[in-house]
Image (cartoon, grey):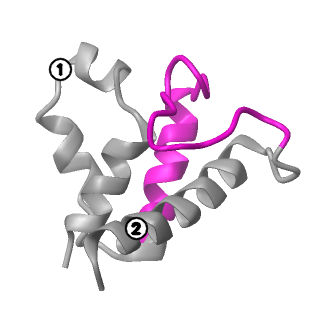
Amino acid sequence: MKTEHREERVLETMAELIREVTGDDAGLGPPITLDTSFHDDLQLESIEFVALAEKLETRWGRRVDLAGWLAGKDLDGILALRVGDLVELVARCP
């Protein structure tokens, strides 16, 4: 599968998971694109981010090591995270 096509599929699934975590089942919140910021656009709370991490593991397994990946980032890096960063992480995993 081409990387671009895989990223599109991962983005669709990621958007669904984010909506579940934020309670936006109707999709009335901001659009979720690769450029959507978890902090500024979605205003994701830390507990919601933990819930998202659990959903990522449930969906894609332990090969998506979000905690390990985040451990290498400083606070500014975490606050600057965009949906596309997580999509890229998941798409690169085997």
Residue to which mark 1 is pinned: 74
> Which residue is at a point 54% across and 49% down the rendered structure image?
51
Question: Taking 14 as reference, is 29 above or below it?
Answer: above
The quadrant in which residue 17 appears is bottom right
Q: Name the residue nearer the viewer: 88 or 18.
A: 88
Question: Taking 51 as reference, is 56 above or below it?
Answer: below
**Rounded to the nearest whole Å, what is the CA distance between mark 1 and mark 2?**
22 Å
Which residues fall within the magenta stretch?
Answer: 28-57
Mark 1 and mark 2 in contact? Answer it, CB < 8 Å.
Answer: no
Q: What secondary structure is the stretch in magenta mostly built from? A: loop
The amino acid on which the numbered mark 2 sits, given as a three-letter code, is Glu
The quadrant in which residue 70 appears is top left
> Is 33 colored magenta in this rendering?
yes
The amino acid on which the numbered mark 1 sits, given as a three-letter code, is Asp
Residue to which mark 2 is pinned: 57
Counting from the top left corner in percent of width and height, residue 6 is at: 37, 73
Counting from the top left corner in percent of width and height, residue 93 is at: 21, 70
> Which residue is at a point 47% across and 74% down the rendered structure image?
59
Quadrant location of the N terminus in the rendered image: bottom left
> 68 left or right of 5?
left
> Which residue is at a point 46% across and 65% down the rendered structure image?
8
Residue count near mark 2 (Cα–Cα under 10 Å), binned few <14, some 14–19, many ≥20: some
Quadrant location of the C terminus in the rendered image: bottom left
**Does dot 2 land on a helix, a strand or a loop?**
helix
Counting from the top left corner in percent of width and height, residue 75 is at: 26, 16
